[in-house]
Image (cartoon, helix red, strand yellow):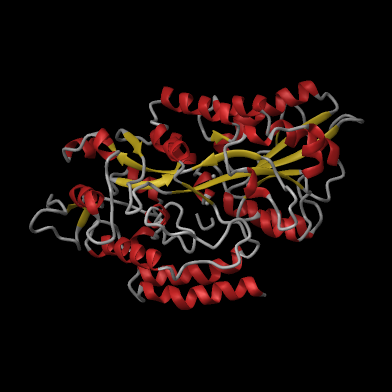
Amino acid sequence: MTTMTSRSRTRHAVAAAAAAVALGVAGCAGTSPAATDGVVTLTYWMWDANQVPGYQACAADFEAANPGVRINIEQYGWDDYWTQLTARMVAESAPDVFVDHSQQFGKFAELDQILDVSDRVAGSGIDLNQYQDGLVDLWRGQDGGLYGLPKDWDTVGLYYNADMLADAGYTQEELWDLEWNPADGGTFEEFVAHLSVDGNGVRGDEPGFDKDDVEVYGLGYNESGGGYGQVQWASFALSNGWSYSDRNPWPTEFSYDDPALVETIGWYRSLIDKGYMPPLAVATSGVGSQEALGAGAYATLIEGSWNARSISELGGADFQVAPTPVGPSGERGTVFNGLSDAIYAGTPHPDEAWAWVEYLASPDCQLRVADEARVFPAVKAASDRAVSAFKDLGVDADAFSVHVTDGTTTPSPVTDRWAQLQTIMQPTMDSVLSFQSEPDSFGPANRRVNELLDD
């Protein structure tokens, strides 16, 4: 699921998710919040419009088994979602249950705005081993409490225009063998150079390539990634032996001054200078990275598994996905993130809210969601079914699951200071990628970040 600036789940709110517009869809047709006397109506918030149908189906099944409860699903676009949720928390009128993000839950837990479900989990006898390894720990507070149950997981992959790939003389199988290094970029840089084409049809690895007049960039991106970089630079840094922090969750210090990150960003930025990636001003000009991929302005794009289906459905070309390249560590790298469902501490119906959250985290609901081929559910058996469902749609889901299989994932960092951290790292990374400062500026920025953790 990451944004941190990115799961950046920002892209989870695709164009279909109209900002500030709630669907207000009840679990069963015709049901509204003004339910019959004696029937409890729970409001459930989501941000991903694409996932609503799957959870409507779960709500219908839940209501059939719990006739005294109705589920009212409301969906908002990503940015509006958190703005509205924060306002509702302040007004003490937040939804009973809402989809939570690993970068957000820390502050909610620290402010006692969501419920610790540890006792309920133990009382229900839920087997936490049924979830993909590492997901449960994303939801543990500093007090040891558990503030949600895993609902899905995500990694990233290298999406590409298969028509451009064929024209460039590459096969899909060759993309699985790409490797990179910060010295010369390896076969991965050779690949993005060859897929870059200027206005005269000259490729990036051919004499006469005009980096100031690029028609197709070999690798696209959407913004700098701030201190997270999930769908920008993180896969490269992680496969270069870098770690975000000393521990996770609840780090005591971050590692943005690590030479492994500094040299990674230096190489990553060099792709802009060579014309293989767009300047930051172009990447942030208002045209989304997926739209640019669909329009043929980008040949490849690192993006999250949560967008696999929407990218596969882009018109104009055949779009496929491969895993991220192998780095100097000898392994691939990716952020491993996931979502949970949180119970608002002020809900007047905590027992009913727990019953709904328990069902959302169950194999029954997650297997149904898996069949929708939108995300990879957290329950291992449901993950396997989702891989099959994606393959039925022509999406090579192994490009995402290979990280889980090979153990090349890094859990998304969890801290209650993420918002403050980003006020430091976002402008720092923006400045570096726009060539206004050098990667060694991460040193002073990292000291300021770590001072936040000491407050």
- The answer to whether residue 313 shows anywhere in this view is no
Residue 56 place in picture, x, y as percent: 66, 29
Taking the spot 42% from the left edge, 25% from the top edge, the residue there is: 391
Residue 271 image position (x, y, % from top left)? 27, 60
Nearer to us in this view, 344 or 142 = 142
* Residue positioned most to the right: 38
Q: As drawn, which residue projects farthest toward the left? A: 207
The answer to which image quadrant residue 352 occupies is: top right
Q: Based on the displayed image, in which of its 4 quarters is residue 69 positioned?
A: top right
Q: Quadrant of the N terminus?
A: top right
Which of the pair 408/418 is nearer the observer? 408
Determine whether, in the image, residue 114 is placed left or right of residue 273. right
Q: Residue at x 65, y 62 (%)?
A: 416
Where in the figure is residue 282, as x and y percent of width and height? 34, 61
Q: Nearer the viewer, residue 274 or 180?
A: 180
Instruction: Report the residue that reaches farthest toward the bottom.
Output: 444
Quarter of the picture containing the C terminus is: bottom right
Query: Can the viewer see residue 147?
Result: yes
Residue occupying image coordinates x 74% and y 60%: 110
Percent of width and height locating residue 331: 37, 47
How many numbered marks appear?
0
- Residue located 74% across and 34% down the image: 358
- The quadrant in which residue 135 appears is top right
